[in-house]
Structures are given as structure tokens and as C-alpha cells.
Image (spheres, coloured by chain):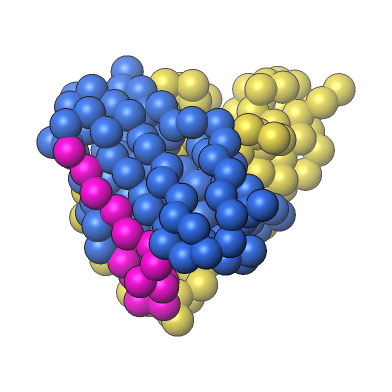
Amino acid sequence: SYVLTQPPSVSVAPGQTARITCGGNNIGSKSVHWYQQKPGQAPVLVVYDDSDRPSGIPERFSGSNSGNTATLTISRVEAGDEADYYCQVWDSNSDHYVFGTGTKVTVL
Amino acid sequence: QAQLVESGGGVVQPGRSLRLSCAVSGFTFSTYEMHWVRQAPGKGLEWVAAASSEGYNKYYADSVKGRFTISRDTSKNTLYLQMNSLRAEDTAVYYCARGTLRGGWFDPWGQGTLVTVSS
């Protein structure tokens, strides 16, 4: 089955840039979507189709995808960005949806 | 705007059954693929099942195939998850989520309902 690997944690100071990676075999050939989940809340879509943002999501959130790594970038990080972040793809071989292992972003 | 509200969670003994419901509003239910996603306590997200927009095609994670059944009732704007032969490892918050085209993203999500499998 297809596996997506994320770093368990990323720490960043306010105003700096956080980069969260999502590794998978030839992930650049797939569409990658990203979710933010704050404690006790449901996930919220923040980036879809590698780099598009849903309405209402700040421009500070951006995404890229190439080769074996997709990246979610959060610019000018704010305290409110502290959350768990998950990447997600669809594996056409298994016809299954797959989530990454998740990354906890801590704002110092 | 689109809203999804899950219900039906609770405490159930191993081997027993439970049915979850997800009532939707604010969008045309019959035109979207719908999903169940779960999250065990302190763990990550796991996709569980999907039902195509018309309900004919259903897809399941290997961990629940043969035990769980997803269905939908367009007349009631409701998605269901029938869970049989429950195991301790099925303990999780279960979310319903609206899909897009096949293979797309999930947006929005419901608030989730907690299922605890314990004797």
C-alpha cells in the first residue's frame, strides 16, 4: 500500500516560515491535499491539488509538489497556526485514500 | 453553507454492532461522493469508506472491509456507516466528510462522533 511520511514535529518562531514535508514514492505524479487539525476539532482543508487554497484560507498557506516530496509552507507563522497537519492523496492502484502520518507544528 | 452532523457513537462491546449517521445540509447531497474517516485516540487520520454520488459504488479500507458497510439515503440527506463485528482497534472518533471528484479532497468535515469498543 502507498505510504506517506511526515516529520512528527516542526517548531517555528512567530513571524518565521514553517515547512512541512510529505514524502511518498513519486508523489509528484499525484494530487496532494493538506489539512489542519486543532485540538478537539475536525480537520480543515487548507490546500488542495498541490497548491490551491480554499476560500477563507490565508495566502500565508501555500503548497508545492515534485519528485518524491510535497511541501506545505506556512509564511509569517502566527500562534493560531499551532496544530497538527496532514497530507492526503488518492492511490489509484489500490483505489484507496491515504493520509500522511501527521506533523505537529509548535509555535515557539 | 455545507454542514455535516454525525450521530450514533457510543460505547459498545467487542463483537457487537453500531450504526453511525451523518445528516447533511447546505448542498446537493446526491452530487457528491461521501466518506467516513476515523481517528483513534492520540493517533492520525485513517480513511475508512466512501460511497459514490449515486450510491452504487462503495470503497473500503482493508482494515474494515467485510465488517463495515457504507450507505446513503438521498431522500433523507443522510450518510450511514454500519459497523459489525467491532474490535477494540475500531475505537476512534468517526468523521464524515464530503468528497469531490473521485480521488479528490475532503471538504468540509463533520464534528465527529466517538465510538468506544470495550467490554
- Residue B84 seen anywhere in this rendered image of the structure: yes
Measured as percent of width and height from the top left, residue A92 is found at 19, 31
Measured as percent of width and height from the top left, residue A94 is found at 25, 25
Residue A64 sits inside the magenta stretch: yes
Q: Is residue B101 left or right of residue B4?
A: left
Res B87 → quadrant: top right
Instruction: Please tell me which residue is depicted at 28% across the width and 40% down the height of the picture.
Output: A70
Q: Is residue B66 left or right of residue B20?
A: left
Measured as percent of width and height from the top left, residue B60 is found at 39, 31
Instruction: Please tell me which residue is depicted at 37% across the width and 53% down the height of the picture.
Output: A73
Task: Tell me the magenta residue range.
Answer: A53-66
Q: Is residue B44 left or right of residue B7?
A: left
Measured as percent of width and height from the top left, residue B51 is found at 35, 47
Residue B56 higher or lower than B7, as above or below = above
Chain with yellow colouring: B
State the residue in front, A76 or B93: A76
State the residue in front, A2 or A65: A65
Instruction: Please tell me which residue is depicted at 76% across the width and 35% down the height of the picture.
Output: B116
Residue B35 higher or lower than A80, as above or below = above
Instruction: Please tell me which residue is depicted at 18% across the width and 27% down the height of the picture.
Output: A26
Classify the position of the N terminus of chain A by image quarter. top left
Q: Residue furthest right?
A: B119
- Residue A95 seen anywhere in this rendered image of the structure: no
Figure colour of chain A? blue
